[in-house]
Image (tube, rainbow, N blue to C red):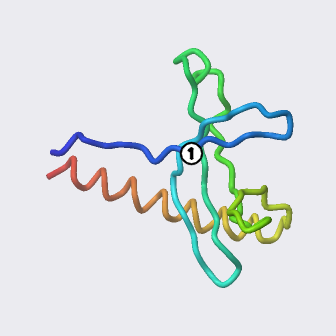
Amino acid sequence: MNNEYQPDLITLIDDENIEHNFEILDTIENGKGVFYALYPVFDSAEDSLKDSGEYYIMEVIEEDGEEQLQEVEDEALLDELSAIFEKHFEEMFDDIDDEEEE
């Protein structure tokens, strides 16, 4: 088994210029745009334990010629994307479980 997993990390800066680190869990690219499922990365194990375990869905937009991420505000689109991401996550974990059984 190869244990050389390296997470795909991204740092976002909020409106108050505070940096937040996230792991990119998955990406969806379809006719409606490009979307990331992001999970917060914490500096301490204690902070990780306090977290709700929720991930965030962000949309890639272009602003002033640069790619940026913004929250998905359309509830119907957010529900649709959540269902797709959840299905991807289930498939990924099923594959991992299958590999461990071998």
Residue 101 position (above or below residue 42): below
- 9 to the left or right of 15: left
- If the image is split into quadrants, where does the N terminus sit? top left
| Image quadrant assignment for residue 83 | bottom right
Near mark 1 (Cα within 10 A), the count class, few <14, some 14-19 or many ≥20, is: some
Residue that sits furthest to the front in the current view = 65
Between 96 and 36, which is closer to the camera in this rendering?
36
- 70 to the left or right of 31: right
- Tally of numbered discs: 1
Question: Which residue shows up at 42% across the image and 62% down it?
Answer: 91
What type is the residue that disc 1 sits on?
A: Ile
| Image quadrant assignment for residue 5 | top left
Question: Which residue shows up at 42% across the image and 44% down it?
Answer: 7
Where residue 6 appears, as percent x and y from the top left, is: 35, 43
Residue 18 position (above or below residue 65): above
Where residue 66 appears, as percent x and y from the top left, is: 70, 63
Residue 61 position (above or below residue 9): below
Between 59 and 45, which is closer to the camera in this rendering?
59
- 10 to the left or right of 67: left
Question: Which residue shows up at 57% across the image and 15% down it?
Answer: 46
Residue 60 position (above or below residue 33): above
Q: Which residue is mark 1?
A: 10
Where residue 23 appears, as percent x and y from the top left, is: 53, 44
Between 68 and 34, which is closer to the camera in this rendering?
68
Question: Which residue shows up at 67% across the image and 35% down it?
Answer: 20
Q: Of helix, strand and loop, which one carries label 1? A: strand
